[in-house]
Image (cartoon, helix red, strand yellow):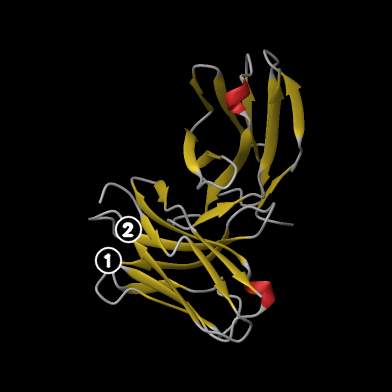
Amino acid sequence: RKEVEQDPGPFNVPEGATVAFNCTYSNSASQSFFWYRQDCRKEPKLLMSVYSSGNEDGRFTAQLNRASQYISLLIRDSKLSDSATYLCVVPLYNTDKLIFGTGTRLQVFP
Amino acid sequence: GAGVSQSPRYKVAKRGQDVALRCDPISGHVSLFWYQQALGQGPEFLTYFQNEAQLDKSGLPSDRFFAERPEGSVSTLKIQRTQQEDSAVYLCASIMNTEAFFGQGTRLTVV
């Protein structure tokens, strides 16, 4: 089993829709989790951190389910500018080494 | 500089040629990582430095790949005798307070 797994998508949603992505991780000892956003032909950038049960930032909500070993990212009221690839990232336990999922591609259409 | 700087942005190499990719991290960032990203995939870990010490090189795909950071600042990723499967974007990141700051990457195409 891969350390971090994501559905690659693409998820095609209309503007204003709510969309959610899941990410599963294999190491139950992992303590921190991140969502990064990557635009086409650009570098990844930090979107949100998830340290305990969850985190909310405007239209974006990240949640952690330790029992089932997954994190989710919910985007409400989708905008065209949300179109990007969303990367789930889990540090290797007790290190700085970041393990990336393959990314989930989101396309928001008018 | 304000961010992580990588050069060159684009590199076309003939199969068998050696290449050197440079990363200039954010000043003061101790940890530096190299990742390889193939089209449609997430970044794959290659190697990791803390200051000048290479702590983990388990992701380097073969002994043709070599990385160094001799003074704990600028890092160079060298690929010898390039093969077509080496074609990818090579990303460098430096980390501060668990956040990774990436450079724009070097897009390597081996022909």
Q: Do labels 2 and 1 share a chain?
A: yes
x then y, percent, for residue A97: 47, 58
Quadrant location, the C terminus of chain B:
bottom right
Would you say B11 lies left or right of B50 here? right
Residue carrying label 1: B73
Would you say B74 lies left or right of A84 here? left
Could you tell me which chain the residue with mark 1 belongs to?
Answer: B
Could you tell me which chain the residue with mark 2 belongs to?
Answer: B
Regarding mark 1 in the picture, which secondary structure is present there?
Answer: loop
Total numbered labels placed on residues in the image: 2
Regarding mark 2 in the picture, which secondary structure is present there?
Answer: loop
* Amino acid under disc 2: Pro
Q: Distance between the residues labelled 2 and 1?
A: 7 Å
- Name which quarter of the figure residue A94 lies in: bottom left
Residues under numbered marks 2 and 1 in contact, where contact means CB atoms less than 8 Å apart = yes
Q: Which of B14 and B23 is in front in this view?
A: B14
* Amino acid under disc 1: Ser
Q: Nearer the viewer, residue B21 or A87?
A: B21
Residue A68 visible to the viewer: no
Residue carrying label 2: B25
Check residue A95 in the rendering and tell me which mark sits there, or answer none: none
